[in-house]
Amino acid sequence: MNEIAEKPDILSLLPEELEAALAALGQPRFRAAQIFRWLGRGVRDFDEMTNLSKDLREKLKENFHLYAPKVLSKQVSAIDGTIKYLWELSDGNAVETVVMSYKHGNTVCVSSQVGCRQGCAFCASTIGGLVRNLRASEILDEVIFSELDSGKKISNIVLMGIGEPLDNFDNVMRFLELVNHPKGMNIGMRHISLSTCGIIEKFDELAARDLQLTLSVSLHAPDDETRSRIMPANHGRGVEKLIDACRVYYEKTGRRISFEYAMIDGVNDSPEQARKLAKHARAVAAHVNLIPLNHVEERQFQPSTPEHLKQFIAILEENGVNVTVRRRLGSDVDASCGQLRRKMQKQRGGQKPS
Ligand code: SAH
């Protein structure tokens, strides 16, 4: 996997680390606070940090990497105002970010990797495999630049874009610290959801961080046969172990887990599967979030019919499960993550942009 080998990445540093890095350059503490403020405002050119001396700005340029993501495309939904960005990163790779407006505020859906290695059969993000992890700063810039460009104050974050966040654990944890930092965007952990396909080996480490975020588990099937068919991550793990890991996580953190469940016609939407799902959800007091499947061109799967969806919900509710159906936002702008990047890859003949 390619990592970008460059100078230290200044935007990935926490304020205290920035202080230490500047002390090494013979700079007083307050300089770190000044620089952190510029960075938080989206300034990505040291020369625009006008309260720093020219000499210091030159030193910073010599010592640190700093880059502003460029808008490769921006689509605004005519139906609901959802905005979908495709950003170009410093090495020419591209990732997607979606800004959704709800009554209670604006939510940004960020990518955590360029591509994904998990291979879910219904997902567009994984088609070209994993290219590389995103840096903490690159994930942070998805939030900062979405807010700056859209003019919409971001109040909630979901890590539900391209990539598997728990496969990029350290950078994602650092991103969370940065975005939650009182001197930064100061977005509360209770306003952040992290979605995983079920990398249970990381659950303990995540629980140990004692964050107040919401863990969403992409379950998508309640039995091993179906789940292994559509989610390779189920191999060698299995539904039972996953549910056990969810229980342990819930007991340790006191935070309810949310199960994501994309309704796929004839695959995971039978009454029997609804009853099995209800059993799992009750066992760990999980909330179930049903997602109408977004059809992906390269995939053969279709969304469940409205009748099957209704029946499925009724069974879950009869069994005392707390269930919601996710509203489809931005359906006219390819807003299910991975689709836009995929389209661009195809247009460029499978090449990453240069
Ligand atoms: N890798 C993480 C987060 C990224 S995907 C995860 O697996 O959870 C965010 C959510 O969108 C996941 O629940 C994922 O399974 C779901 N998803 C992917 N492709 C989809 C599609 N075509 N239709 C509906 N949901 C999809």
Image (cartoon, rainbow, N blue to C red):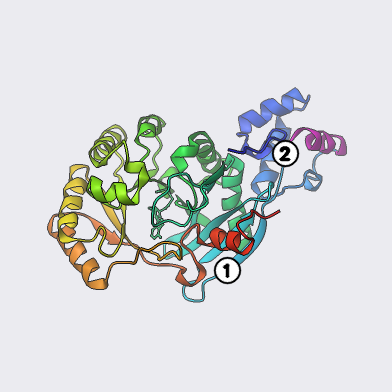
| Residue at x 38%, y 63% (from the top left corner) | 300
| Other-residue count near label 2 (Cα within 10 Å), few / some / many at <14 / 14–19 / ≥20 | some
User: Which span is picked out in magenta?
Assistant: 54-65
Mark 1, ligand 1, within 8 Å: the answer is no
| Other-residue count near label 1 (Cα within 10 Å), few / some / many at <14 / 14–19 / ≥20 | some
Q: Position of residue 63 (x, y in %)?
A: 77, 32
In the picture as drawn, the residue positioned furthest to the bottom comes out as 78
| Residue 86 is at least partly visible in this image | yes
**Quadrant position of residue 316:** bottom left
Tell me the tag on residue 148. none
**Quadrant position of residue 233:** top left
Q: Which amino acid does label 1 sit on?
A: Gln
Q: Is mark 1 on a helix, strand or loop?
A: strand
Front residue (pair 6, 231)? 231
Q: In which quarter of the image is ligand 1?
A: bottom left
Q: Mark 1 points at which residue?
A: 75
Q: Circles 1 and 2: CB distance less than 8 Å?
A: no
Q: What element carries label 2?
A: loop
As for residue 14 lying within the magenta part, the answer is no
Q: Mark 2 points at which residue?
A: 65
Q: Earlier in the sequence, mark 1 or mark 2?
A: 2
Front residue (pair 6, 253)? 6
Q: Position of residue 156 (x, y in %)?
A: 46, 53
Q: Main secondary structure of the magenta part?
A: helix
What is the spatial separation of the Cα atoms under label 1 and label 2, in whole angstroms?
A: 29 Å
Q: In this view, does 105 lie to the left or right of 254?
A: right
In the picture as drawn, the residue positioned furthest to the right comes out as 55
Q: What residue type is labelled 2?
A: His
As for residue 57 lying within the magenta part, the answer is yes
